[in-house]
Amino acid sequence: MWFIRRVCFVLVFLGLVASAWLKPAPMAAQTPLTGDQAAPLLNPVSEGTLQDFETGLNSTNGAVLYQTAAYPGTAFHRRNSTVGYAYYGGGCTYLTAANGGNEDNNALSTRLDLPEGAVIVGVEFQYRDTDAVNNSRLYLYRFDGAGGIASVALLNSSGNGGHGSSYTTTNLNTTYDPFNYSYSLVWYSGAAGINHALCGVRVKYAYSAPVARPFTMPPANQPDALQGGSSGYSFTAASDFVAINDTISYSYAGAGCMIHNGGANLAAEVDMPDGMEFRGYRAFYYNTVSGAAMNANLAKINGSTSVDVLVGSTTTSAGYGEDYFTFPTTEIIDELSKGYLLYIRPGTSSVTRMCGIRSFWAIPVQARPTSAYTNPVSQVSSDRDASGMLLSENRPQPNQLHNVDLSMPEELASPMITNEYQFLTARSFVPRESAQGMESSNNGCVAFGSDLELSYTFQLPPNSGLRGVRFYYRNPAGDSVLARYWAYNGYSWFTPIFSYSIPSSSDYTSSLVSYTGSHYDLSNGTVSHSLSVAALNSTSTVDFCGARVWYTTGLRSLYIPVAFKN
């Protein structure tokens, strides 16, 4: 017995020593990179306000998991093509020019994307406000696609001399229901200019493990009706579709609906569970003009080609209407090899406006075969969490970046960790400033018409590990282009996780920025993640064709030996 107690003591002592050794240390402040020099670097722990949002549970509480979706200001886009906006720094954005007195047209917005059935319990608005008279406002709206609009949450800034935040739980405990509603975060600036800046929004929600609904046979005339089993929906308001180049003319028509006045289409990423079958999508619109059809098209993009899956046209002309579109072939979501992009072309007046698209997915009739994967990953030079903290020792690595074939998949050798992927199409990226020249090019890519930085915000699951990001491009002239991965906390603190110079390439290709130790997101949503691609000259010939985020859902933890568990 004495021997067993002594062994137990030694094991516990070693565990405590290892825990202290693995505990990350704060990372020293860094010099801002090009394009991020307006805001100061702050320590997110000692600076800013830790308020109600951080209190309470951010982890498992019985069967309920509290999680956070975080969006920097750069995730927001304009709803009117004549509104000017610019990048303030630290992930913040502000208006430079307004469109007359139409406040709804002057707002910036982004789609709120949560798991179906999640219960929204809190919303935090992060801002910069040096205006003693006017406040800016942040709304969480929901739209039903047929003219219905509800305000789920409202928060205000205050002229506090700089960065601040406000938090609300008022009238929340709202269930996220993507079958009936699209959800949009909308910011109204108190005035144009740098006195008001949007720096971020965080939405805290409670999420239980999904319980399969009993299967019900849908009506023949509505195949995407609310069904049981493993099925789900992704609903995006038309006002959260973004322009694919800077020549498009568009405006906001209310209730999440949009008007199109010229140029190319508006676009939105389709994000659904990997391995599921994309069954179809439903377009919601308003039309009182006979014969005035609007388009709702779908394309799949793999980083070097774009293929039209469906070109759909709306049909009715009696007010609010909806049409459901199915595909000529089976479409299995495969984020490892491609992404899906929806395009809409609304009408040219308030009597022909597009209001939203609801996508429907379900378990495929026949599962896709598993590919024989290879592992191109080698050692890394460092391993940091989302706030830039060092998690492990530096290890020498002569070449951290791996140029591989477009078809080369990423996968860990370990069977203990689940690999996940998210393919981000280039045309769903948003310019950081309205004055920058963004142009759509062939194969679903984006061309850089001037000094331009495109940005995309994505959500990593809590305690997941970033394994790498693959960038797809064509750079025939070897122009200077940086691909960067950022973390922001909404209080003007930011850190570049990595910065990678896109190499020259005469044809479409890709490069993988990889980490073997994993970049673990230990923040539980207290920071937001953003990818950006920046052309550093005004005559760039680069085509940016998308990015694929590769992460794991396995946890690296120090566990107490089984013998010590009750």
Image: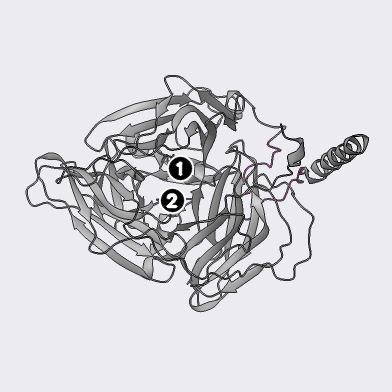
Residue 40 in magenta stretch: yes
Horizontal side of residue 530 vs 306, given as left or right = right
* Label annotation for residue 434: 2
Magenta span of residues: 24-44
* Residue pictured at 42% horizontal, 61% vertical: 334
- Mark 1 is on which residue type? Thr
Q: Up-down: is 417 above or below 358?
A: below
* Label annotation for residue 68: none
Say how many tags the image has.
2
Seen from the viewer's position, the closer of residues 275 and 336 is 275
Q: Quadrant of residue 5?
A: top right
Q: Up-down: is 253 above or below 509?
A: above
Circle 1 packing at 10 Å, graded few (<14), some (14-19), many (20+), is some
Measured as percent of width and height from the top left, residue 220 is found at 15, 46
Seen from the viewer's position, the closer of residues 211 and 24 is 211
Residue 190: in sight, yes or no? no
* Residue pictured at 38% horizontal, 58% vertical: 333
Q: Quadrant of residue 479?
A: bottom right
Residue carrying label 1:
96
Q: Up-down: is 392 above or below 449?
A: above
* Residue pictured at 39% horizontal, 44% vertical: 78
